[in-house]
Image (cartoon, rainbow, N blue to C red):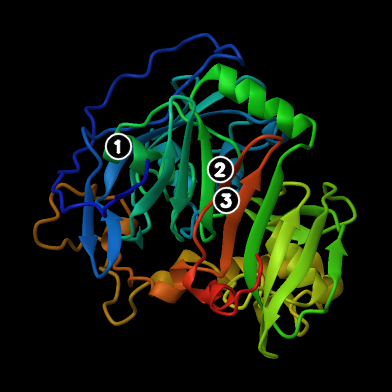
Amino acid sequence: MAGTVDGAKSASVECHPPLPKKAKPSKRPAIREKVQSEAIVDAPPYFTENGLRKVRPYWFHYHVFAKQRWFGKPLAQVLEKELYSSFPGFFASAIKAGRVTVNNELVCPEYEVQNGDLIRHMCHRHELPVLDRGVTIIENTDNLLVVDKPCSLPIHPCGRYHFNSLIQFLKYSFGFDNLKILYRLDRLTSGLVVFLKNAETEKRFRQQLVNSDIRKEYLCLVEGEFPDGELTCDQPLDHLFRSMGLMRVSKEGKPCFSRFRKLHSDGKSSIVKCFPETGRTHQIRVHLQFLGYPIVDDAIYNCDVFGPSKGKNGDYGKPIEELEQDVRRRFSMDNWLDHGNPPLVQGERKKGDESEPADCELCRMKFRDPSISELQMSLHCLRYSGPDWTYECSLPPWASVLKENKIEF
């Protein structure tokens, strides 16, 4: 089966906060209790504008159990570091206002997080826009759903993306639910995504993963003339900035291994085939950065914030602590502010904004639309293959020269 899910139509959904409920004291929930974060809207408030699919702000209940690295640390400090906000004191204010609770009880910002704590945050959620592009269905059976994901769309709800995620878009556009992912792709990466529909299929594919029977093949466009032959990288990766999901090469990191082979070059850039043997976050991007051939339009890892050599050979030209701060400033949400339309001052309201909460900082700001180039990257998942199966998707436009020159890929 093949088809395309078209972009979302305009929709109007009012954003009203839920009626406040009195917090009831309760026993600390069991660590294995299943809780579900949820949006307080009846349907995704999608609308399209300037070639982008956007989501009107809405109320959202975020639930999370305390992680071990949080134990014994002040709640406000944990949330500022883990969830990240550009507004100083944002989470401390939210805790004082009662929008953040622990085990259904009000606490102070200095509360020390404990094992088993269930933290709930009621927030007015402002999602980031994605490209208004369809999702091509490659195969849809009782066991599998295989799709070609466009750039800019994250697989799962994360950070400032919920309805603008592939999982949610497939759910509300096609009715697909309870899908299990085989491999994740980065938000800006396009290409093949395989979903498993039932426990039996999941068990079969998971066993193939354990046996290393699944082969992953990617294409990318990198800076410079990539060397002939096969180039490998086995540098371990660790978090650079956990709340922003960024990685770096580190001896203390998790082991990973990638293979690369040049397919075509014009002297200034090269189309490279990538074979990641492991599946770490941003593995291909960071390994190419380390080798000195970053992806041409990778706004993060092909950036001078990583030093004069852009992180080649792990040389950042500065201490890691300084790099963390520079990265935070460079990729801060403040860079998306529309400076041609200054943020509204405290207490000032735009006409028709009565449904917006008075203390929502984001509601008082106007953000510029990202350009198309900021929402895509020349990294494409081309093919997955196993012992008795293969799935692949079409070439991206930047790799069309392979087909034109009859280069095997």
Above or below residue 34? Residue 233 is below
Q: Secondary structure at mark 3?
A: loop
Q: Nearer the viewer, residue 131 or 265?
A: 265
Q: CA distance from mark 3 to mark 1?
A: 21 Å
- Which callout, 3 or 2, points to the residue nearer the camera? 3
- In the image, is 384 to the left or to the right of 140? right
In this view, 266 is above or below 234: below
Task: Please tell me how crowded label 3 is: few (under 14), some (14-19), or many (20+) other residues with Cα within 10 Å.
Answer: many
Q: Quadrant of the C terminus?
A: bottom right
Residue 213 visible in this rendered orientation of the protein? yes
Residue corresponding to mark 3: 185
Q: Nearer the viewer, residue 301 or 98?
A: 301
Q: Amino acid under label 3?
A: Leu
Q: Which sits in the foreground, 178 or 381? A: 381
Q: Which mark is residue 174?
A: 1
Image coordinates for residue 397, horizontal then vertical, percent: 47, 72
Residue at (54, 59) in percent of width and height: 189
Q: Mark 2: which amino acid?
A: Leu
Q: Is residue 77 left or right of residue 37?
A: right
Q: What is the distance, in whole Å, between disc 2 and disc 1 at their CAs? A: 35 Å
Secondary-structure class at tag 1: helix
Q: Which of the 4 image quadrants contains residue 375?
A: bottom left
Q: CA distance from mark 3 to mark 2?
A: 26 Å
- Name the residue at the right extreme: 251
Residue under pointer 2: 79
* Farthest residue, direction top: 27
Q: Mark 2 or mark 1: which comes first in sequence?
A: 2
Residue type, numbered disc 1? Phe
